[in-house]
Image: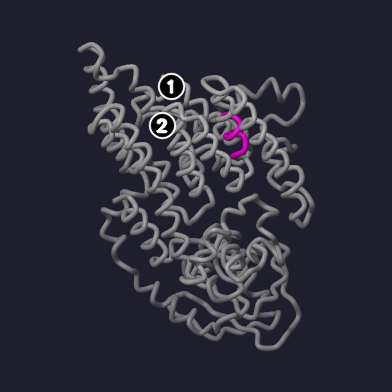
């Protein structure tokens, strides 16, 4: 059921031109490169930019065979829907085996309808969709004291994204604490070593500047705490301010009626929460985008684990507490749906393709396959499966594409303002581009012969 819901939402967003180059276009370019036997280059990130120099996510190569058969951004969206939906299986099955049908339904629906997963589905495609089922299976194994299985499901997280090695480290520490000391310590070591290797060696090796470009968000001059002693002393305050961080934490725990806090499995959420809340990048703090998705299987795993305290074989009061907790969990899940993307499935507009989408495709159809195109953010993923696409408007990047296509009527405002975009179009015309098509605000320019390069500044 959730696979169908996730697929419907993400595909309809794409068909309505509500997906973007940053990030769906970037990931499609990487997967497309893998599908043709090349390194995961994304022109959207820069000329010849290897995506392994941004985040270490070689797991994307696993989508290459499917993309080779179905070369479309929708392939990524459907794959993401499937991966996110699969995580329901181990969590709900564990709840059923331990606490019965009601607990399984509450857990499965709570996870599947959670705002953290819904926000990921509603915002393009991201590599973390691979981490979510791995974490669900690993947490379930931890809760059932199957230590080898827990480590086995956790270790592939190192191939999903560089920060997840810290989560592997905590999983290993949990195993060492609760079960096999040797296995746990080995898993923790591999997790920490993997993150250090990826951040300090592998990613800089692929990065054009030979550095880890995201470091400044955590330890650079512009981070909240910096690296001084005073900054270190200020870290506890940085973890809970501004207010958005506390709100995010409350909303993460509310669907479990805060019962997840009663399980030590909740400790697995600490690495992700810490790096997000210590970041100087405001979107990391809130409930938008995909950043909370990896926390959802951990939190619901802790929720199922916490129910052991009120197992049905215990006293009447314990059983009553269990039923109350499940009822509150269900109520919070239902209450939170309205504020997040899954609610869009009940909106009639979701099922109506606006006439402007047809106008956009009429204009884009003028662009030949394999052309080089500089496109507006929301038009990028409509073209990345057949053209080499860059994002129109990035500062100080010369325009070398043969085609430019923008939405002059309703500019998105990213990466530059509407006013700056208009100025950039004037510069492009001066550089030799000429308007060849216009339909309902969608403007297509073409430069048939090389002219002076126009820089966007």
Picture residue at 55% right of the left edge, 19% below the top: 177
The mark tally for this picture is 2
Q: Secondary structure at mark 2?
A: helix
Q: Is residue 144 above or below residue 161?
A: above
Name which of mark 2 and mark 1 comes first in the sequence: 1
Q: Which label sits on residue 263?
A: 1
Residue 457 in view of the camera: no
Is residue 166 magenta-colored?
yes
Q: Residues within 10 Å of mark 1 (few under 14, many from 20)?
A: some
x, y (%) of residue 60? 56, 57
Q: Nearer the viewer, residue 345 or 423?
A: 345
Q: Quadrant of residue 446?
A: bottom right
Q: Are marks 2 and 1 in contact (CB under 8 Å)?
A: yes
Picture residue at 71% right of the left edge, 66% below the top: 48
Residue linked to disc 2: 301
Q: Nearer the viewer, residue 325 or 422?
A: 325
């Amino acid at each position: 059921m959730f696979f169908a819901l996730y697929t419907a939402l993400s595909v309809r967003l794409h068909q309505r031109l509500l997906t973007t180059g940053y990030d769906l276009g970037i990931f499609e370019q990487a997967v497309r490169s893998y599908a043709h036997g090349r390194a995961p280059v994304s022109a959207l990130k820069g000329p010849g930019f290897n995506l392994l120099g941004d985040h270490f996510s070689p797991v994307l190569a696993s989508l290459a065979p499917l993309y080779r058969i179905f070369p479309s951004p929708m392939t990524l969206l459907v794959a993401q829907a499937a991966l996110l939906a699969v995580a329901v299986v181990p969590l709900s099955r564990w709840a059923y085996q331990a606490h019965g049908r009601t607990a399984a339904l509450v857990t499965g629906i709570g996870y599947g309808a959670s705002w953290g997963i819904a926000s990921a589905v509603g915002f393009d495609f991201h590599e973390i969709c691979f981490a979510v089922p791995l974490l669900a299976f690993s947490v379930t194994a931890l809760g059932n004291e199957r230590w080898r299985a827990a480590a086995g499901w956790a270790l592939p997280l190192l191939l999903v994204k560089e920060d997840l090695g810290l989560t592997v480290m905590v999983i290993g520490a949990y195993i060492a604490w609760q079960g096999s000391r040797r296995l746990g310590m080995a898993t923790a070591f591999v997790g920490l070593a993997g993150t250090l290797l990826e951040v300090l060696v592998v990613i800089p090796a692929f990065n054009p500047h030979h550095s880890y470009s995201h470091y400044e968000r955590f330890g650079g001059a512009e981070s909240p705490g910096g690296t001084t002693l005073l900054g270190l002393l200020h870290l506890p305050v940085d973890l809970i301010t501004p207010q958005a961080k506390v709100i995010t934490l409350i909303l993460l725990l509310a669907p479990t009626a805060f019962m997840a806090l009663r399980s030590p499995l909740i400790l697995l959420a600490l690495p992700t929460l810490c790096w997000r809340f210590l970041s100087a990048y405001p979107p990391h703090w809130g409930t938008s985008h995909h950043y909370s998705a990896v926390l959802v299987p951990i939190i619901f795993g802790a929720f199922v684990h916490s129910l052991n305290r009120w197992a049905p074989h215990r006293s009447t009061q314990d059983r009553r507490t269990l039923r109350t907790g499940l009822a509150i969990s269900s109520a919070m899940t239902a209450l939170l749906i309205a504020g997040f993307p899954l609610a869009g499935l009940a909106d009639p507009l979701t099922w109506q393709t606006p006439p402007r989408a047809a106008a956009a495709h009429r204009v884009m159809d003028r662009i030949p396959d394999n052309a080089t195109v500089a496109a507006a953010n929301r038009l990028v993923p409509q073209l990345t499966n057949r053209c080499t696409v860059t994002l129109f408007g990035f500062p100080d990047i010369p325009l070398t594409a043969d085609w430019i296509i923008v939405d002059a009527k309703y500019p998105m405002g990213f990466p530059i303002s509407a006013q700056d975009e208009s100025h950039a179009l004037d510069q492009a015309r001066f550089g030799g581009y000429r308007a060849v098509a216009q339909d309902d605000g969608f403007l297509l320019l073409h430069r048939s012969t090389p002219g002076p390069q126009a820089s966007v500044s």
